[in-house]
Image (cartoon, helix red, strand yellow):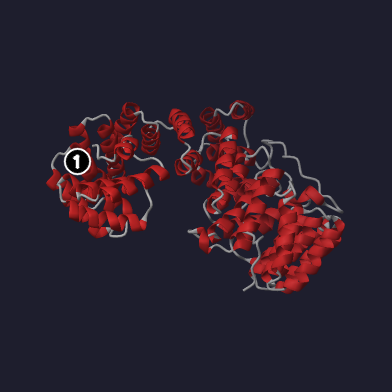
Amino acid sequence: MILSKYFFVPCLGLALLLAGPGYGQKKQKKNKAETPAEQPLSFAQKDKKLDNREKEASESFFIEGMKYMMLEDFPKALERFQRAYAINSSNAALNYKIAQTIMQMGRANEALPFAQAAVNIDSSNPYYYLLLAQLFGGQNRYDDAIKVLTKLTKELPNTDQYLFQLADLYLAQNKYEDALKTYDRIEKQYGFIEEIAYKKQQIYLRQNNLEKALKEGEQLISSDPNEIRFTLAQAEMLANNKKTDEAIVLVNKALKAEKNNAQAHLMLAELYRQKGNLAESEKELKLAFGNPGLEIDTKVKILIDYIRQMPVPPAKADPDLQDTALELADLTIKTHPTEAKAYAVAGDVQALAQKKTDARTNYLKALKLDNSHFKIWQQVIFLEAELAQTDSLVVHTEKALELFPNQAMLWFYNGTAYMLKKEPARAIKSLEYGKKLTIDNAELQNQFNIQLGDSYQSLKDYPKSDAAYESVLAADPNNPHVLNNYSYYLSLRGQNLDKAKSMSEKLVKQNPKEATYLDTHAWVLYKLKEYKEARKYLEEAVSLKKDADILEHYGDVLYQLGEKELALEQWKKAKQIGKASDLIDKKIKDKKLYE
């Protein structure tokens, strides 16, 4: 099937049926027709015989009606015209003005009889025909509108300009052959007109007549060889109909005339891609992107296509595709340095390519130019959380909250940032507020409760901490974060150790190779004085991860089992790694366990 990007959707053009010159007169080469001026609205045309008094009264009402018409007071205008009509109903101009006024009042169906009467009374005024055709068209009576305009253009002199409206009506009815014949009449009268050539071309495409469509394109090119868009339109038509080689020849011809034409380079990139010549395609695409003449929205659309092809996780990404996307993103910024969307789309590409610092930088530049897009703030905050940039996370969540105070996610990350800064009171304030915004989102509410459990624990507000954890477990009994933290904190407090053991036991069964969870369970067992069992889990944890806390715990268990030299050895290893407890130095110095 023949297709084209420029496929024409017929326009009814009903507004053009009002009095005035045809739009096709923009580029006329010969025999320019004069637009007839609206004929004087005289009462002398086929009027019934009136005495002087009646004539004066009728004309007076008519003049008043015209005055109100000019003031756009249509109800008063109609009332005056109707009074004139009561005296003299056979006047064409009066019928015409009544029809026009009623139409302006939005009652087009009531206007039709008066417009018809105007034409019947005086068939020499083209504006009467135009109004009648417009009213028919407004009621989707296109065949009747066509008949009116056909009669107008055939029987009245100097009305060829209305052939344009007639052709539009044929198009609205999908009467392509009639439209083509009408366009031939137009060209015979006015010569070659660009708009007409385009419309004929689209009709031929609808008829699957590529040969004639291309011929119209050749005429367009011949009409103005310096107009490169005609050549590119012809090339695109060829490309859309699988004539790729011919399209490439035409685009290269266009580039010889205008070597920096961004649209031509973009089209050539697509043509080379279709032929499988990816190296040349990429080269042309970069030339197009490096040209500020190519609209940024076009560049963004292409980059979005690249983004859709960049997989997650990035380990599976095509490195060539990723490198190309990154380079195109950089070119977009260079050619549109004041466009927020240039930095935003570059950030998207870089985030997928795991260039998180670069992505954050570009997102922030986008926000500096336009801070109204929540999704960009969201991306900045996600990246800062991943990059552990706690101070920046506080700053940017608070700035974002000034703009989007009802976004629960912002309150969550603001509270999380304060928790990481070891300011639990401020964290709780944000988390409690944000939690109120999550009533209809159980999953997000769980996330708030997890952080609240940790924050209240930091403040030693154990009842609220436990309540928050219990809320999570009620909705998600296997939540690993809560099972781990809740059981560990209970062990540190020495409270409800059986419950702590139950939770940590469930945790390690679900995650038998997670060192942190093994350590938690071992420490609960330690608090229960089940040292041999604790040793088993800690030895597994040590084999999986060299961590100061795990090694120190392992040393403590060994000490309780009487293996003091081995315990000292583990404490020393813990100190060497760093981030052990505050008691590590005293344990090593005194070779003794302190709790």
Residue 587 on image: x %, y %:
30, 38
Residue, x 73% and y 54% (percent of image)? 288
Question: Which quarter shows the C terminus?
Answer: top left
Residue 578 on image: x %, y %:
41, 42
Please rate how many residues cluster around mark 1, counting C-alpha atoms within 10 Å: few if below 14, some from 14 to 19, many from 20. Answer: many
Q: Foreground: 55 or 108?
A: 108
Q: Foreground: 93 or 273?
A: 273
Q: Amino acid at mark 1?
A: Leu
Whether residue 177 can be seen here: no
Q: Quadrant of residue 425?
A: top left
Residue 165 on image: x %, y %:
67, 53
Q: Foreground: 305 or 3?
A: 305
Give the vertical position of 455 relative to 552 (above or below): above
Give the vertical position of 446 relative to 263 (above or below): above
According to the picture, the residue beneath numbered tag 1 turns out to be 490
Whether residue 358 can be seen here: yes
How many dots with numbers?
A: 1
Q: Foreground: 427 or 331?
A: 427
201 lies left or right of 106: right
99 lies left or right of 201: left
Q: Which structural element holds mark 1? A: helix
Question: Which quarter shows the N terminus?
Answer: bottom right
Q: Quadrant of residue 322?
A: bottom right
Residue, x 47% and y 32% (percent of image)? 391
Residue 326 on image: x %, y %:
63, 53
Residue, x 65% and y 61% (percent of image)? 5
Residue, x 59% and y 41% (percent of image)? 362
